[in-house]
Image (cartoon, rainbow, N blue to C red):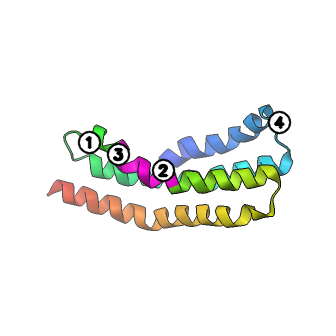
Amino acid sequence: ALAHWLATGIPLGLIAPVLALMLNLDGPAMLGVVLTLLAGTPALTLLGMIGAALAVTLRRGGLLLPILVLPLSIPTLIFGVIAANQAAEGGSAFGAPFSILCALSLFGLVVGPFAAAASLRQGLD
């Protein structure tokens, strides 16, 4: 999961200011979008790790993976969009959705490896 996040999350966070310039965002909005991406991508990576561990032992796991992972990723996407929108509008309500986004990432960091290990162990039996 760490390798996946380093290969996808960090480059996405690094390219975000360039893309924000293309969208004519100002400095604080650009910083909010970058922080939101860097806080939200670990949650999505860890959800994908759990889903991949569940689907790897199944015969048609590739079909089951989107059905498992997409509904679980919706809260992360919602709070990420709300936080980025608040940062772009310059609102003072950026902190609450950003904190929830960080909490989702930390929860995934704590629970994700254990859930993936348990799933893989169950699949081997």
Which residue has dot 1 on it? Answer: 61
Nearer the observer, 95 or 15:
95
Disc 4 and disc 3: Cα gap in Å?
Answer: 36 Å
The residue lying at 33 percent from left, 44 percent from top is 65
Which residue has dot 3 on it? Answer: 67
Furthest residue in direction top, as rendered? 22
SS class of the residue under badge 3? Answer: helix
SS class of the residue under badge 2? Answer: helix
Give the mark nearest the N terminus, 4 or 3. 4
Identify residue type, mark 2.
Answer: Thr
Which residue has dot 2 on it? Answer: 45
Give the mark nearest the N terminus, 4 or 1. 4
Identify residue type, mark 3.
Answer: Ile
Can you say which quadrant of the picture contains the C terminus?
Answer: bottom left
Q: How many marks?
A: 4
The residue lying at 75 percent from left, 55 percent from top is 86
Which residue has dot 4 on it? Answer: 24
Q: Nearer the viewer, mark 2 or mark 3?
A: 3
From this view, report whether residue 59 is shown above or below residue 40.
above
99 falls in the magenta region: no
Identify residue type, mark 4.
Answer: Asn
| Residue interval drawn in magenta | 66-74
From this view, report whether residue 88 is shown above or below residue 21.
below
Q: Nearer the viewer, mark 1 or mark 2?
A: 1
The residue lying at 66 percent from left, 54 percent from top is 82
